[in-house]
């Protein structure tokens, strides 16, 4: 068994095996450790076996009501043993499927209990394996509570192995597990009583959905006692008795079986986590935003980190963790994680509910559509329940969807897509839904939220009809739409970072008097990082077209190279310029809108990723041709000199541009004519897929400027304070003597050349080495060491920026597209309005 791997995943559940397969897909030599059956709790004794039995109970219920459908049968009975046999067969088939997937993917399966031994070592069944990275995916175990008589109860594992249906079942705990078993056994004829300590069962579900389900359960003979505290479970002859109190009054319920379903707890028993340097907190493994633990090279996902304990979330985290190991910088986004409850009728929800939205101060619009008005639900004979859409009152963005009714757990997929992508009510209702289908109910709920439902009465519209003055005329509607469009193209305000009059070594000291400036630097770097990460996500969703080059990893070189410039200085830069624009002060909303090709973008949607522009801030554009902007910067510097101004022209470019003729011509010209230009090379060590040393005879690029008798320096582009200080010194020298100078900022891009670059030309070892030098993390360590900030502050900043970037994406997504008739607009300077002949017919 001894050997070495790139990745070892500990735990073969839905988080672990998905992570292992993804790691193998990315070329990593991968092993997975499992002491039990592959598939974990979900597949072996959780999600899958319970749903198999629930399907059997649902068919039994339908069969009993078959007469109305013309199905005539006598003596309909339920064979619990056969249902159990089918459940086992389904589980066995899926376990074999997981085994086959791992084998086909080239993943090595190690059998036994894993123990972390530190420094990348894992002991499995007495033998040691070595890994560059370890992913902890050990899941969770059934929670136990100090309850008198707990030995008489069964848990969610044991109830799946019952040989017969209990006549009376008491369920302690009204969470998802407890309510699903309550639903199943109530449908099979058990007298079910649920005892819940909180005021509501299923506390994470909207109250109106829970109330409807409670009514349904009561209708089939079940009982729910909320705000009830269980005192003990006692033997009562051959049966059991659960004694409890509600509001100070005692009560008791007799049962043949008592299910204790009070949740699950992260499982780390025998893992040796803390001894290996992995921090635990209340039993859970502590991770950062990227799922890293406190131990180098160790990651954790799924239930063991104590977040959203759902199988699909664990799978999602598994992919995120592996892609982070591969250097892709994935930060899990949980705002659209769906939650499903397999009761009958089913319950599913995603995003914010009415109450939660209002608690956050968000004004909402709510639309409901009952399944009783759904043609498909009526044909199924399952018309109980409704779909509810919660949307932002001002923008119409869908914030949450909540469903109780037939196939709610399938319907939630469309809702999840809507919430995840920030779709609006308009976009939902304008999507053609097949008829007759259950998803039409979501469309109708979206219409109802706007007072425009088709298949139920609209109270809002009826009220308006009674008062004609309240009905908007076509003219006023058009005006409102025009005003909305005008509002969206209103010039945006740039963010402010407090920059001192001059950036000196004293201003960069880690002292309290410099805290605002240093915090501003940190926040700007974090904003650029998160902006670029989300831009990559939007590219994969086809929101962004063309090429897209990211500044991830280069934040120190970007911020440090731009903040020292004065407002009147000029900037010419390359195609990798999103961060440059933001650091210069261009509103990031306008930058994202340009990426989306929208009218509110920096170039009115005409330029896209590689052509940002901001004349008022003298940001003279990004340019798509490698090195094509260097002669333009030379011309700009000549103009500054001709006008006898004290401005500086900063020209930013990559290492690849230093091997073309225009580079040498521009440097030579600027030196011959003493032009006030800063040549700023962001050397991320690769020109597309070619390393610097393979493309340039001179490895240290700053030395190329020496050929033109030009002062040149090399700085650590991963150290933002060093870059700021040295750049500031050079800029002020240029301002004083109008002589060109050269800076090479050594850094490393964490992503491929562009978003579509698979990045196979760099080794994982190389990427991981540079990941450890992350400029943001390094700066945070400095701030923490200087006593200016702590992890709680950094976490707050990340959360605030996450929210800001969400708003940025929302702004871009909702901004109007450029008009076709304006195709040639902005091509000619000052002639568009005066010369209609120039416009012609754009089509």
Image: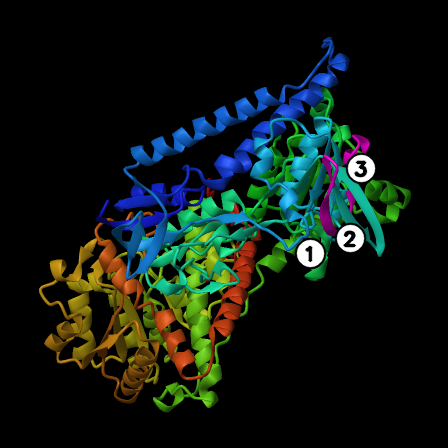
Please report the residue visible at 31 percent of the width from the left and 86 percent of the height from the top: 732
Q: Is residue 420 left or right of residue 32?
A: right
Disc 2 target residue: 227
User: Tag 1: Cα neighbours inside 10 Å, few (<14), some, or many (≥20)?
Assistant: some
User: Tag 2: Cα neighbours inside 10 Å, few (<14), some, or many (≥20)?
Assistant: some
Q: Say whether residue 226 is magenta.
A: yes
Asked if labels 1 and 2 touch by Cβ distance under 8 angstroms, the answer is no
Asked if labels 2 and 3 touch by Cβ distance under 8 angstroms, the answer is no
Disc 3 target residue: 215
Q: Looking at the picture, how far across and down is residue 47, in whole percent?
A: 54, 37
Q: Say whether residue 217 is magenta.
A: yes
Sequence-wise first label, 2 or 1: 2
Please report the residue visible at 26 percent of the width from the left and 59 percent of the height from the top: 767
Callout 1: SS = helix
- Could you tell me if residue 739 is visible in this image? yes
Q: Nearer the viewer, residue 600 or 555?
A: 555
Callout 3: SS = helix
Callout 2: SS = loop
User: Tag 3: Cα neighbours inside 10 Å, few (<14), some, or many (≥20)?
Assistant: few
Sequence-wise first label, 3 or 2: 3
**Which one is in front in this view, the residue at disc 3 or the one at disc 1?**
3
Disc 1 target residue: 357
Magenta stretch, residue numbers: 213-240
Kindly report the distance in space between the C-alpha atoms of the residues bearing marks 3 and 1.
26 Å
Work out which residue is located at the far front of the displayed protein and give it. Answer: 237
């Amino acid at each position: 068994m001894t050997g070495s791997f790139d990745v070892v995943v500990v735990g073969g559940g839905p988080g672990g095996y998905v992570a292992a397969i993804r790691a193998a897909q990315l070329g990593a030599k991968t092993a997975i450790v499992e002491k039990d059956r592959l598939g974990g709790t979900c597949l072996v004794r959780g999600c899958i076996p319970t749903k198999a039995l629930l399907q059997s109970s649902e068919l039994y219920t339908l069969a009993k009501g078959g007469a109305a459908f013309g199905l005539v049968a006598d003596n309909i009975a339920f064979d619990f043993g056969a249902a159990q046999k089918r459940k086992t067969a389904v589980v066995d088939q899926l376990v074999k499927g997981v085994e086959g997937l791992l084998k086909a993917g080239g993943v090595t399966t190690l059998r036994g209990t894993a123990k972390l031994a530190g420094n990348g070592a894992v002991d499995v069944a007495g033998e040691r394996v070595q890994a560059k990275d370890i992913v902890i995916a050990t899941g969770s175990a059934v929670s136990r509570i100090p309850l008198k008589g707990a030995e008489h109860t069964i848990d969610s594992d044991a109830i799946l192995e019952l040989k017969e249906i209990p006549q009376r079942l008491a369920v302690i705990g009204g969470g998802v597990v407890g309510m699903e078993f309550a639903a199943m056994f109530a449908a099979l004829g058990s007298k079910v009583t649920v005892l819940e300590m909180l005021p509501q069962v299923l506390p994470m579900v909207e109250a109106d959905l829970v109330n409807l389900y409670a009514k349904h359960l009561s209708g089939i003979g079940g009982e729910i006692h909320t705000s009830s505290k269980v005192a003990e479970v006692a033997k009562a002859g051959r049966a059991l008795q659960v004694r409890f109190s509600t509001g100070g009054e005692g009560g008791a319920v007799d049962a043949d079986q008592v299910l204790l379903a009070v949740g699950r707890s992260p499982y780390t028993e025998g893992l040796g986590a803390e001894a290996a340097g992995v921090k635990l907190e209340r039993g859970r493994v502590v991770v950062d935003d990227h799922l890293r633990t406190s131990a180098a090279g160790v990651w954790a996902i799924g239930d063991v980190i104590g977040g959203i304990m759902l199988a699909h979330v664990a799978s999602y985290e598994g992919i995120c963790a592996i892609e982070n190991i591969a250097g892709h910088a994935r930060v899990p986004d949980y705002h659209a994680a769906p939650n499903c409850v397999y009761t009958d009728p089913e319950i599913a929800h995603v995003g914010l509910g009415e109450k939660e939205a209002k608690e956050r101060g968000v004004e909402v619009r709510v639309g409901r559509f009952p399944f009783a008005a759904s043609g498909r639900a009526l044909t199924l004979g399952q018309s109980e329940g409704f779909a509810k859409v919660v949307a932002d009152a001002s923008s119409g963005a869908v914030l949450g969807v909540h469903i109780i009714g037939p196939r709610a757990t399938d319907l939630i997929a469309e809702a999840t897509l809507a919430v995840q992508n920030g779709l609006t009510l308009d976009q939902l209702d304008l999507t053609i839904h097949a008829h007759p289908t259950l998803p039409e109910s979501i469309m109708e709920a979206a219409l109802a939220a706007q007072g425009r439902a088709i298949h139920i009465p609209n109270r809002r519209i009826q009220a308006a009809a009674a008062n004609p003055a309240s009905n908007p005329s076509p003219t006023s509607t058009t005006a409102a739409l025009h005003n909305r469009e005008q509002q969206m193209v209103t010039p945006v305000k740039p963010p402010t970072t407090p920059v001192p009059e001059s950036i000196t070594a004293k201003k960069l000291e880690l002292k309290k008097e410099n805290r605002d400036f240093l915090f501003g630097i940190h926040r700007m770097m974090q904003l650029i990082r998160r902006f670029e990460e989300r831009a990559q996500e939007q590219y994969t969703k086809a929101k962004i077209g063309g090429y897209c080059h990211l500044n991830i990893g280069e934040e120190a070189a970007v911020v440090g190279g731009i903040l020292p410039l004065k407002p009147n200085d000029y900037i010419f830069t390359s195609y990798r310029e999103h961060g440059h624009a933001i650091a210069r002060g261009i509103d990031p909303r306008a930058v994202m809108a340009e990426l989306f090709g929208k009218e509110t973008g920096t170039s009115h949607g005409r330029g896209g990723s590689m052509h940002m522009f901001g004349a008022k801030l003298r940001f003279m554009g990004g340019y798509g041709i490698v090195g094509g902007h260097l002669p333009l910067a030379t011309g700009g510097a000549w103009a500054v000199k001709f006008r006898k101004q004290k401005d500086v022209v900063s020209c930013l470019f990559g290492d690849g541009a230093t091997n073309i003729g225009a580079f040498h011509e521009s440097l030579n010209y600027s030196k011959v004519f003493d032009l006030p230009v800063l040549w700023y090379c962001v050397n991320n060590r690769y020109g597309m897929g070619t390393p610097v040393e393979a493309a340039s005879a001179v490895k240290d690029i700053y030395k190329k400027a020496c050929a033109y008798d030009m002062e040149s320096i090399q700085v650590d582009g991963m150290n933002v304070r060093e870059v700021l200080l040295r750049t500031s010194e050079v800029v002020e020298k240029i301002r004083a003597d109008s002589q060109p100078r050269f800076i090479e900022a050594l850094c490393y891009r964490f992503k491929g050349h562009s978003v579509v670059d698979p990045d196979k030309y760099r080794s994982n070892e190389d990427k991981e080495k540079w990941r450890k030098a992350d400029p943001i993390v390094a700066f945070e360590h400095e701030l923490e060491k200087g006593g200016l900030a702590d992890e709680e502050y950094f976490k707050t900043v990340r959360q605030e920026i996450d929210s800001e970037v969400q708003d940025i994406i929302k702004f871009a997504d909702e901004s109007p597209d450029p008009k076709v008739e304006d195709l040639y607009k902005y091509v000619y300077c000052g002639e568009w309005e005066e010369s209609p002949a120039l416009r012609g017919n754009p089509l």
